[in-house]
Image (spheres, helix red, strand yellow):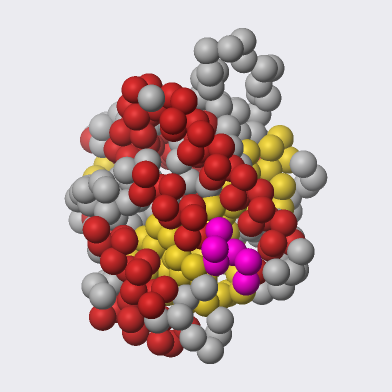
Amino acid sequence: MGNCSNGSFLPLVSTPILAFPLMGKGQVLPHEGGVRGGRASGKIILFGEHAVVYGEPALAVPVKKLFAEAKVSTVSRAGIWISAPDIRLYKELPRLPRKHPLASVVDAVFAALDISPPSVLRTSPPEGGEKNGIKIKVTSTIPIASGLGSGAAVSVAIIRALSAYLNSPLNDEKVNEIAYEIEKIHHGTPSGIDNTVITYEKPVFFQNSPLSPRSNAPPPPLQEKPIIKTLQVTKPFTILIANTGIHAPTKKSVADVRKLWEEDTKKIETLFTAIGSITRTARQAIEGGHPERLGALMNENHRILQEVDVSCQELDRLTEASLNAGALGAKLSGGGRGGNMIALSTKENTPAIAEALLKSGAKNVIVTEIK
């Protein structure tokens, strides 16, 4: 069993191929008093975490009760100013490290629009020069480093708000492309699922190319781009999301799993193949109108993730507590070693399960209906 570890703020190689058009809800907030805003929801992975990095599918859904919001406004102070009160950050853009995610996403928007920011927005102007600049304020209700897509949501919100402020709102495909590039800063080798679910705000079945050949045999031709299909939820179902309160950056757990894969490729690939099979079966259950069948699949997925050493005592305690309280199934969600777990419930059992989770140490519990 892995150790839950503390972390800090901020969650393949090309733009996704969509199996059919995904019409996202691209939340650009109303223009009020010269302020342009953007909003992006959080996300939760139902099945397939970690295995998705190695070419297996994953299922993920938006969590609209949680969101990041960015607001861009003109200020009477030269420069581009980044304000993120949740992490006590207020700095002029050039003073952030070059690879800082917030600086990178702002630069990426200007680059995507082929706009060179006026010098007044980049540095202090010469004496007697124009004094106006812009401020980008970012807030979020999404817990940090907990598998809920906080990094991707912040990126998507900024991209939407800033491009709207510059009178050139970017479409969802371009938003997703930029957000994915920023995810590489957060996670190192991201699957691409976070930015995709968050950009389009739809449940998705996601499958990417493996990072490298998955055996010593000659590898089959690999798809160049991930395939994304919207998930048709035939019958709504209820999920509880419980937060351990432990920040666990995905980048660290992904790197540790990579080491395990390198040490015993055959074993880890066997486990990931099993997760892939579980994920495909879960998709069939959801689209076939049998969400109650997800419970046993969640339990088995969690067992395998324990074997991959990405669970921890706190996550296991919460999954056990939810099952004892009547959950149909439970598992960790996301990178593991902290962050969140999810439990499948009937509406009738939801209050009892939520109470059991809180009594067992969950810092908070969110109830969401997947539909």
- Looking at the rendering, the stretch of residues picked out in magenta corresponds to 292-297
Return the residue nearer the eye: 132 or 101: 101
Q: Residue furthest top?
A: 218
Residue 236 screen position, x and y as percent: 66, 74
Q: Can you say whether 138 is above or below 193 in the image?
A: below
Q: Can you say whether 216 is above or below 214 in the image?
A: above
Tell me where residue 355 sits by quadrant: bottom left
Residue 295 shown in magenta: yes
Residue name at image x 79 percent, y 45 percent: 20
The answer to whether residue 256 is visible is yes
Residue 194 screen position, x and y as percent: 51, 47
Give the quadrant of the C terminus. bottom right
Q: Can you say whether 105 is above or below 215 in the image?
A: below
Q: Is residue 269 left or right of residue 285?
A: left
Residue name at image x 54 percent, y 45 percent: 275
Residue 111 shown in magenta: no
Q: In this view, does 265 lie to the left or right of 143?
A: right
Return the residue nearer the eye: 371 or 99: 371
Q: Is residue 96 left or right of residue 196?
A: left
Q: Residue furthest right?
A: 20
Residue name at image x 55 percent, y 27 percent: 210
Report the magenta stretch's main SS: helix
Q: In this view, does 65 lie to the left or right of 56?
A: left
Q: Can you say whether 118 is above or below 45 in the image?
A: above
Residue 333 screen position, x and y as percent: 43, 56
The answer to whether residue 148 is visible is no
Total numbered badges shown on the rendered structure: 0
Tell me where residue 166 sits by quadrant: top right
Residue 216 screen position, x and y as percent: 52, 13
Residue name at image x 35 percent, y 69 percent: 320
Return the residue nearer the eye: 139 or 4: 4
